[in-house]
Image (spheres, rainbow, N blue to C red):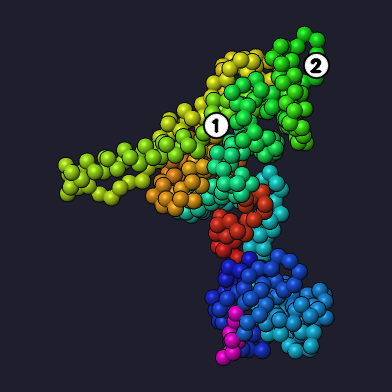
Amino acid sequence: MQFVWAHRLWDTSPMVTADGRRVRIINPGVLNENAGPDFFNASIQIGDQRWYGNIEIHVRASDWYRHGHQNDHAYDSVILHVVQVADAEVRRPDGSVIPQITVKCTPEAAARCNTLMLSSQGSLPCYDTIRSIPSIYHTEWLTALAFERLYNKSQRIIDLLKITDGDWEAAAYITLARALGFGLNAEPFETLAKNLPLKFLNRHRDSLIITEALIFGQAGMIPEPTEGEDTYITEIRREYEFMARKFTLHRPPIVWKLSRTRPQNFPHRRLALLAMKIHTGFAIIARLDDLTTALQIRREQSFHDTRIYYPHIAGPETPETPSIEEIRREFDIHLQGYWATHYTFSGTSANSPRALSRSSLDRLLINVAIPLMMARATVRGDVALINAIPETLRQFAAEDNRDVRLFTQAGIACRDAFDSQALIELRREYCEKHKCLFCRFGHRMLSREIVR
């Protein structure tokens, strides 16, 4: 009933109150998710009189009394009672009669609504019907979702500037650390980065062993001493203990998730990647800015040359972003020393010094580089770059994970990372939060069968 009212899905025939007065809904109001009337700040016209106030909705009119609203002054401002079954006249606490109208909702729509809202966490309640929605609605909604996810990521980076005193590289460091958690350990990585600031690490970055000792020590990962342990473990333990005493370091409470995870996906090598990135000079923002500036120069020169030789065909400047390969090189780290041949502190051997696989590397670009560029362009007001960045996602292959597969198996096409990012946003922000009534797919399904 709330969904019907909020989205104006009532029967199009003229509305009349129980006593026969014509009703026109000017503004249905704003849904109230707390105690009190269902909708605030509505505007309606009854006969020739305009009313402003709140709306209360019940399946049966008698529910007004069953809920005790006749004695609750929070309902003094109700200007209209909307019901399916008008089995009673309702009054305010002062005894005045409240205008009442009837809005019908089909049993099929109610059943569909309950199916959507009460589905289990791992299911997709629209699985059986989502493929029947015309593809134009798929394209429209996925485009909006992809932009929503990108803007949310860039806004998270802009918010980080508040705790880094406007230091973009420090915000990029926290962003990279969180992304290296790849979902499962995102929170532990971010906690570590916030408690081990980039400025502090940069003071010791000349020594890789000290940088690794600080990161692994604060992460709580350095093993206890054992007989015959690798000399590297002994050395970073000694370095960390010295640095912890010297700077009175307090280790944050971090719980790493390792169960049901293959050694190559453990956080150890990703922490080593972070250490190597700092050791070689953490300048992601500067590098991305250089790439963007170089591209703009090339684009302007190309545009200028075209106007000189072909002035009659030269069109407006086309926004572009640095190529994937240019950005990928900035994150493609090769590890040195112990971590070039180990996945963990145990004897598990790695077969390559490359820290990340190609697919994992591309996930970093999607979750770090592109949002950083978007955040920079947003703060600078670079509209051309803002418009170009989302299209960069089209150059990446679609991500292959459980969330994406859930939708592709239901019949939604996923051609590239732009689409897969949209599907991840849909799953995380709508499906898992049971916000089906706010999803355009859910809205489309319900609106087809809600009123009869």
- Front-lying residue, 32 or 125: 32
Q: Is residue 271 or residue 47 the one in the foreground?
A: 271
- Label the magenta part by its dominant secondary structure: strand
User: What element does badge 1 sit on?
Assistant: loop
Judged by depth in the image, the label closer to the viewer, 1 or 2, is: 1
Circle 2 residue: 225
Q: How far apart are marks 1 and 2 (CA)?
A: 32 Å
Instruction: In this rendered view, identify the residue nearer to me: 49 or 330.
Output: 330
Tell how many labels.
Answer: 2
Q: What element carries label 2?
A: loop
The type of residue carrying mark 1 is Phe
Instruction: Give the quarter of the figure containing the N terminus.
Output: bottom right
Quarter placement of the C terminus: bottom right
Asked if the stretch drawn in magenta spans residue 49, the answer is yes
Q: Which amino acid does label 2 sit on?
A: Pro
Question: Mark 1: few, some, or many residues within 10 Å (few <14, many ≥20)?
Answer: many
User: Could you say where residue 266 lies in the image, as x and y percent from the top left?
Assistant: 67, 26
Q: Position of residue 242 (x, y in %)?
A: 75, 23
